[in-house]
Amino acid sequence: MICGGLVLLACSSILIGYAMRDGIEFFRAPAQVAEARPVDGQRFHLGGLVKEGSLVRGASNEFVITDGKAEVPVRFAGILPALFGEGKGTIVKGFLQAGVFVADDVLAKHDEDYMPQEVMDALKAQGVFQPST
């Protein structure tokens, strides 16, 4: 009975892990993308600051996310949040396609003091984080 229970537990753990493999999306900073480029089509979250002068609004919004060490061009065919702008922290969800991050969701910070923790940690690691005064 114990051996049968262990076999069932092992099988269920394997099935759960297999089912979750596509549902887990990791956070990456632009420098991490430059160091170890994910395969095209692999979903993940990308965060950093919107590079000044890079935002082009239109049917397909285009901008560049940077962490001070690397930059990743982003394309988003949707409505950008009202608080989204150049020089502000953001997280985008999507995948790389031919060197361009194709976003299907854009998250912007909600006031001048807030920055997503993942973005703040990535900017601190690159030495470019400047807290609000």
Image (spheres, helix red, strand yellow):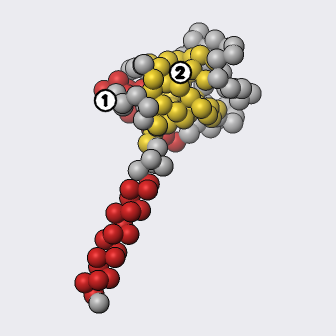
> Quadrant of the image for the N terminus?
bottom left
In the image, residue 33 sits, relative to residue 7, either above or below, namely above
State the SS at label 1.
loop
In the image, residue 9 sits, relative to residue 53, either above or below, namely below
> Quadrant of the image for the C terminus?
top right
**Disc 1: which residue:** 36
The extreme bottom residue here reads 1
Residue at point 60%, 32% (across, down): 104
Residue at point 38%, 56% (across, down): 18
**Closer to us: 15 or 103:** 15
**Residue 83 visible in this rendered orientation of the protein:** no
**Disc 2: which residue:** 74
Q: Position of residue 44 (x, y in %)?
A: 46, 37
Q: What amino acid type is highlighted by mark number 1? A: Ala
Marked residue nearer the N-terminal end (2 or 1) = 1
Residue at point 34%, 75% (across, down): 9
Q: Position of residue 108 (x, y in %)?
A: 64, 32
**Closer to us: 48 or 111:** 48
